[in-house]
Amino acid sequence: MKFEDMKKIWDEQREEHVYVINEQQLHENIKARKQGASRMVNKIELFLLAVNGITGATLITLNYLDRSGDVLFGTLMGLFLLGVAVFILARRRKRLRHENRFDRTMLGDINHAIENATYQVRLSYAMLLTVVPVFAIAFLGAWKEGKSPLVLGFIAIMFVLAFLLGRWEHRGLHVARKKRLEAIREKLTSEN
Amino acid sequence: MTAQEQESIFHDWLGKHKGVLFKIIRAYAFEEEDRDDLFQEISLQVWRSVPSFKGNAAVTTWLYRIALNTAIRWKGKERRHADRTSPLQPTMPVLQEDNRELDERIEWMYREIGRLNEVDRSLCLLLLDNFSYKEMADIVGISESNVAVKIHRTKRQLSEKSKDTDL
């Protein structure tokens, strides 16, 4: 059968009668999906902003007030965490500005989705990195207070678990999604 | 634009052009649950896109672009997994299949279109719905020559497949 014959068959279909739409339910589901998607990203961003911002500011303040010991490590760590918080804040503002942006072409939209996916990858990576200083602070604090090896071991195990879970989310979810979008872009633009 | 105006335009588009959306969900999703899910996802994107529509293109062209773009990125199982891990209640289905006789030839075409890769599927649907190469190139964002190459491959693939069927 030639493609032109298929086209004739295609033109015969009355597709609008295939389904009946429950419009009331559709309205409710759209509302739920819209809120659900932005609520999840919002929560992660706000959580990371709070953890990085508060921990960073606390570290810098404590090291500034008590300069009796080695303050370099703590201050640098605090500055790093504040830097992460500023990065998240800037990206969040950009994300909110472009949330409902639609490009003129499918390729443009894919590029925009890749840009968002790159942001998610960086965000999850930042979350992964945040685990390290939080662990270091908790572990050193417990060690200085002379906690038992059992407590120190528990903190270390929790750190490993949190790190592995974060890495799974980073690679399995965000990096994989970005790769899938890049593969679609490749299919769109490839000349064969 | 007020929320009410957005809502009104969305329902107007849905009423007039739902056939376009149904074609796309049938080409990209193959189980009832998946079709329902994809339809809801496309509807959400169409609803969101209403304020961005400036009237430079026909509504059908706009809808095709939004819907195809959502469909090529959509993954049914991933979405359902996300729903399970989300605190939201699972949503109720919105589509009910009409109990009419299905045309075997159309069913065969959807099956074969569904076997093409995501991008070729989009171009095939646009071609079947009378879009020119120039319009397809504008919707997808690639060159006309690239569209021609992909369309040529798709036509050949579908014609080859039709040899194995009695339709």
Image (spheres, coloured by chain):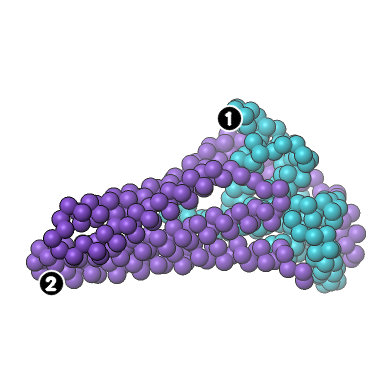
Give residue A3's position: percent from left, percent from top.
Answer: 88, 62
Establish if A136 lies above or below B79.
below
Q: Residue at x 77, y 69 (%)?
A: A191
Residue B1: quarter of image? top right
The CA span between labels 2 and 1 is: 59 Å
Disc 2: which residue? A149
Residue at left offset 52%, top offset 66%:
A176
Along the viewing direction, whichever of A70 and B166 lies nearer the viewer: A70
Q: Mark 2 lies on which chain?
A: A
Three-letter amino acid code of the residue under disc 2: Pro
**Residue, disc 1:** B3
* Count of numbered circles on the image: 2
Q: Can residue B132 be seen here?
A: yes
Say whether marks 2 and 1 touch (CB < 8 Å): no
Q: What element carries label 2?
A: helix
The color chain A is rendered in:
purple
Q: Indicate the position of residue A159 as horizontal and vertical percent values.
A: 27, 67
State which quarter of the image contains the C terminus of chain B.
bottom right
